[in-house]
Image: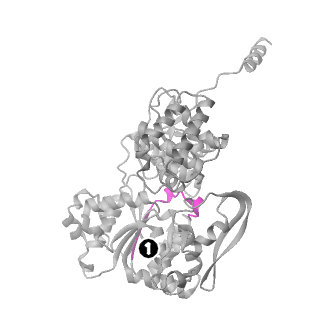
């Protein structure tokens, strides 16, 4: 395998640690890679080693790399093509999201009649069974504020749908909306995961999953393995049982997706249970100053610390501002322009505001709004080039909004309704505080005299790096940092990721003290005379 690396001309760019990880002959390997240690590079190189190894020249099965987001797969795909050339990704070899693998496995179970979707024989009489899998239901209908929700279940091998109830109300897609779509073979990626989870409880289905993996893959590389949930871990374990080569890559300190069901604490148990060996990448290329190197070292060793500070006053001397929540970024004033209002929930008004936000971030920061694609889907705008085509109309909305004041917010919202109505069948509701408040938040950024700094949550910043990073920390986050971080604590891992995005320096942004009210001044004066 070393010969393969040398032939590709990439061996000179590797440290000894990286070379050992990329070219390791171990069939099953876990690569622990901290911030800036070249995780993506090593993953790309190991992909090429597995792809072009002489020992597997006549093996027609695929080398597959998976990650949990499209952005991560895109980055790895580009790196593989740059290092190994276009031939590296000739079908069946591919780099995809783990959801793509889940879809393939469920489709195979359906072809084997181990899972039977409603009305499948009627829909696909030729036996070519394929679901129409979507990211969400946002493009089909608006949500309903209710405790009721739908869930899929297996009765034997037959997929069914029923209504269930939660303890509190939330914006949900009702069973009545979803049922006819399910019967047409339309579903979401979460539906695929739910049914596959249930199917794996059946020994026959589990055996078929192992067979499918073994028949179609010879090597599987899993990026960010500490973000894996129970189903992801089950698929990995079945892949190991199928006898294919497994490479797991990740960092226990950067597991952020427990709110989606990730179980980072289960990964060490998986490694021990399956006998997967471990290699560590310890040399980071990110740290360009002794200050940032010492910060990262102290964080990882659990030492408490207090970050240097910068006052929030006018133009900020940082490249990006990070917070654990979008709401905290919007509280920072006009000097910070967040790339989202909050985690996208799918409302049409929110989608329209996101489209306008994207117009602003593109023009000021040359960056897309974080949930632009979700917004386009919610508005059922099939043309992904629509934001560019709508630039004159959206700029008109901006000009209406820019002068400031509540009347400008209302007028801008009404104009935005017209813009959306010209390209989408989705109808925005009449002006209301809940629908216009996002435009009011955006207005503050438009009247800022300088150039605002982009604002991101820690989750969105994961994998990125900047020269100087400003952090907005709440009191509980400050206290955790001062006491020392623990990689087993979810909050602590999020703080760690935020603190390790900078190459040069990490600062905590401190709000300007608010001027005392007249009443408080009078109380202070009275106290001074007694």
Q: Is residue 227 visible?
A: yes
- Specify whether residue 42 is painted magenta: no
Towards the viewer: 176 or 165:
176
Q: Secondary structure at mark 1?
A: loop
Image quarter of residue 411: top right
How is colour applied across the structure in the image? one colour
Which residue position holds label 1?
Answer: 276
Location of residue 219 in the rendering, given as x and y in whole percent from the top left corner: 36, 75
Location of residue 189 in the rendering, given as x and y in whole percent from the top left corner: 53, 68
User: Relative to residue 256, is residue 505 drawn left or right?
Assistant: left
Towards the viewer: 98 or 270:
98
Badge count: 1
Q: Is residue 305 visible?
A: no
Towards the viewer: 111 or 183:
183
Up the image or down, 14 lies above or below 306; here it is below
Which residue lies at the image location 60% right of the left edge and 78% below the top edge?
198
Determine crowd level at label 1: few under 14, some 14-19, many 20+ residues with C-alpha closer than 10 A.
some
Image quarter of residue 247: bottom left
Location of residue 356 in the rendering, given as x and y in whole percent from the top left corner: 50, 42
């Amino acid at each position: 395998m070393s010969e393969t690396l040398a032939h590709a001309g990439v061996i000179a760019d590797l440290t000894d640690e990286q070379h050992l990880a990329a070219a390791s002959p171990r069939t099953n390997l876990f690569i622990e890679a901290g911030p800036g240690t070249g995780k993506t590079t090593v993953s790309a190189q190991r992909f090429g080693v597995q792809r072009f190894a002489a020992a597997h020249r006549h093996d027609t099965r695929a080398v597959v790399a998976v990650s949990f987001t499209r952005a991560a797969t895109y980055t790895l795909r580009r790196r593989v093509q740059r290092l190994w050339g276009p031939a590296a990704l000739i079908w069946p070899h591919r780099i995809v999201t783990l959801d793509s693998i889940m879809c393939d496995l469920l489709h195979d179970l359906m072809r084997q009649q181990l899972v039977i979707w409603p009305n499948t024989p009627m829909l696909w009489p030729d036996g070519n069974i394929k679901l129409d899998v979507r990211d969400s239901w946002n493009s089909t209908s608006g949500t309903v504020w209710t405790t009721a929700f739908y869930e899929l279940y297996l009765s034997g091998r037959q997929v069914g749908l029923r209504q269930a109830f939660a303890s509190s109300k939330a914006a949900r897609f009702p069973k009545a909306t979803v049922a006819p779509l399910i019967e047409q073979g339309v579903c979401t990626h979460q539906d695929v995961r739910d049914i596959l989870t249930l199917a794996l409880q059946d020994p026959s289905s589990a055996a078929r999953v192992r067979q499918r993996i073994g028949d179609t893959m010879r090597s599987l590389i899993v990026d960010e393995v500490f973000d894996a949930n129970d189903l992801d871990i089950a698929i990995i374990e079945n892949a190991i049982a199928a006898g294919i080569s497994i490479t797991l890559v990740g960092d226990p300190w950067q597991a952020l997706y427990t709110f989606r069901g990730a179980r980072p604490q289960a990964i060490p148990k998986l490694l021990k249970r399956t006998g997967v060996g471990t290699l560590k990448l310890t040399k980071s290329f990110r740290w360009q100053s002794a200050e940032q190197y010492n910060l990262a070292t102290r964080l990882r060793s659990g030492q408490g610390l207090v970050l240097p500070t910068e006052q929030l006053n006018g133009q900020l001397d940082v490249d990006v501002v990070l917070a654990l929540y979008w709401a905290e970024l919007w509280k920072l004033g006009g000097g910070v322009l967040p790339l989202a209002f909050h985690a996208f929930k799918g409302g049409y008004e929110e989608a329209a505001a996101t489209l306008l936000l994207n117009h602003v971030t593109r023009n000021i920061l040359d960056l897309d709004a974080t949930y632009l694609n979700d917004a386009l889907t919610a508005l059922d705008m099939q043309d992904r080039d629509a934001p560019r085509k709508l630039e004159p109309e959206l700029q008109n909305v901006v000009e209406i909004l820019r002068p400031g004041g509540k009347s400008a917010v209302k007028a801008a919202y009404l104009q935005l309704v017209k813009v959306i109505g010209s390209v989408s069948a989705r109808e925005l509701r009449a002006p209301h505080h809940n629908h216009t408040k996002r435009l009011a938040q955006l207005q503050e950024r438009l009247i800022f005299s300088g150039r605002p700094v982009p604002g991101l949550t820690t989750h969105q910043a994961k994998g990125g790096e900047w020269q100087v990073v400003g952090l907005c920390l709440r009191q509980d986050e400050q206290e955790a940092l001062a006491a020392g971080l623990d990689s087993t604590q979810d909050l602590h891992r999020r703080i760690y990721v935020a603190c390790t995005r900078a190459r040069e320096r990490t600062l905590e942004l401190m709000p300007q003290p608010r001027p005392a009210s007249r009443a408080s001044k009078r109380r202070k004066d009275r106290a001074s005379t007694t």
